[in-house]
Amino acid sequence: VEVTRDLMKERFVQREVKAGMDHEKQWREDEGQRFKTCRERYGPEYRGNEENYKNFLEWKMMFPREEIKADEAAGVYVVNNDNFEAAQQLEKILNLTPKTRKGRLIFISGTPGAGKTTIGEGLKRENGFVHFDG
């Protein structure tokens, strides 16, 4: 699964917000390495530094991975998930029907924020797959 770099950074921040992180408060008060470094580099306030924060996250936490190349003969497919359409793409690629999905093991790999869990949950919901995340 792949997504654009900007979308991956945005999803990372949104995941922090969903988990209850108050970026403005953290930026002003947190003494941990991440926010202390951001204050030193970009100034005392989060507002106006949202893109700097995302770029810092990319530099500090998002490591480039070797590109996965599609190889349909080997059963390796690369799908884009910028618009959360990868589950539907996989259904079409794999021709998932009640008969063809039985006994299938689908391994989903991608960078943080690419939507691997969302795809797994979608395949579970729409096709009755068992979803293991970890």
Image (cartoon, grey):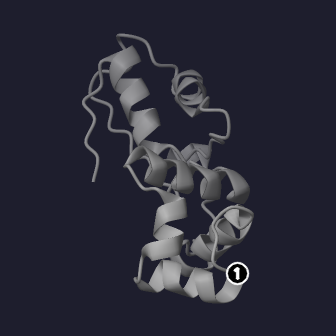
Q: Quadrant of residue 88?
A: top right
User: Residue under circle 1?
Assistant: 42
Residue 22: x percent and y percent? 46, 56
Q: Is residue 70 visible?
A: no
Direction from residue 51 to residue 62 in the image, left or right? left
Foreground: 105 or 45?
45
Q: Give me the residue at 66% from left, 42% from top.
A: 80
Direction from residue 129 to residue 38 in the image, left or right? right
Q: Quadrant of residue 100?
A: top left
Q: Tag 1: Cα neighbours inside 10 Å, few (<14), some, or many (≥20)?
A: few
Q: Give me the residue at 51% from left, 78% from top.
A: 35
- Quarter of the image that includes the C terminus: bottom left
Q: Secondary structure at mark 1?
A: helix
In the rendered structure, which amino acid carries the disc numbered 1? Tyr
Foreground: 43 or 20?
43
Q: Give me the residue at 30% from left, 25% from top.
A: 129
Q: Is residue 105 above or below residue 129?
A: below
Residue 115: x percent and y percent? 51, 43
Number of numbered discs = 1
Residue placed farthest to the top in the image?
98
Q: Give me the residue at 58% from left, 44% from top.
A: 77
Foreground: 58 or 16?
16
Residue 51: x percent and y percent? 72, 64
Q: Is residue 38 visible?
A: yes
Foreground: 48 or 75?
48
Residue 5: x percent and y percent? 69, 59
